[in-house]
Amino acid sequence: MSSQKGNVTRSRPQKHQNTFSFKNDKFDKSVQTKKINAKLHDGVCQHCKEVLEWRVKYSKYKPLSKPKKCVKCLQKTVKDSYHTMCRPCAYQLEVCAKCGKKEDIVIPFNKDPENPETNQRSSHRRSCERNEESDDDVDFDNDLDDKSDNQVD
């Protein structure tokens, strides 16, 4: 823009046009970049979600190396970058875990605040164990019937 006083409008188009969009994994194919790109930003409001997605998109997102202190419970339980509250406190107070405002949460937390993947695996494991136990009970009952038949003879 011109430095003339009052000249606010530009008369020419932008000099350098971008021909392609920025790709954060074009040259960096590391495991950490893949994890950052796959991360789900849950428990935050729409504005904070957009901020975090912008950081990921332009390689500005830096993951935490060790847990931070929560501003509510004062424990070192904050494991997500740029968040100020731990998952249980944010879930209990129903506020955004990043800014702390009582906004509409876009993607709510899972019931297991620590790790949603382990919750699914353990529930699957438990259901498999129940099926195995029920099969064992049936076999046990059959064994009792066989033994009682033998004793009657």
Image (cartoon, rainbow, N blue to C red):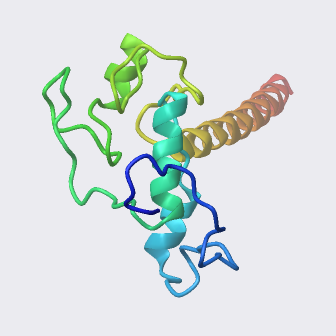
The correct choice, above or below, for 57 with respect to 138 in the image is: below
**Residue in the foreground of this view, choosing between 143 and 61:** 61
Marks counted in the figure total 0
Q: Nearer the viewer, residue 62 or 152?
A: 62
- The residue positioned 82% from the left and 27% from the top of the image is 145
Find residue 62 and report its image quarter: bottom left
**Residue most toward the left?**
74
- Name the residue at 28% across, 29% down: 85
Q: Residue at x 48, y 76 (%)?
A: 31
Q: Position of residue 42 (x, y in %)?
A: 52, 36
Q: Quadrant of the C terminus?
A: top right
Viewed as shown, does residue 49 lie left or right of 152?
A: left
Residue 134, compared with residue 7, is above or below; it is: above
Q: Is residue 54 above or below residue 146?
A: below
Q: Is residue 137 left or right of residue 56?
A: right
The residue under the point 40% across, 17% down is: 95
Residue 34 lies, in percent from the top left, at 54, 70
Task: Kindly give the residue lying farthest to the bottom in the view shown.
Answer: 27
Direction from residue 22 to residue 74 in the image, left or right: left
Residue 4 appears in which quarter of the rendering? bottom left
Where does residue 8 sit, x and y in percent of width and height?
A: 50, 49
Q: Position of residue 89 (x, y in %)?
A: 32, 20
Q: Nearer the viewer, residue 38 or 17?
A: 17
| Left or right of 134 in this view: 118 | left
Viewer-proximal residue among 79 and 127: 79
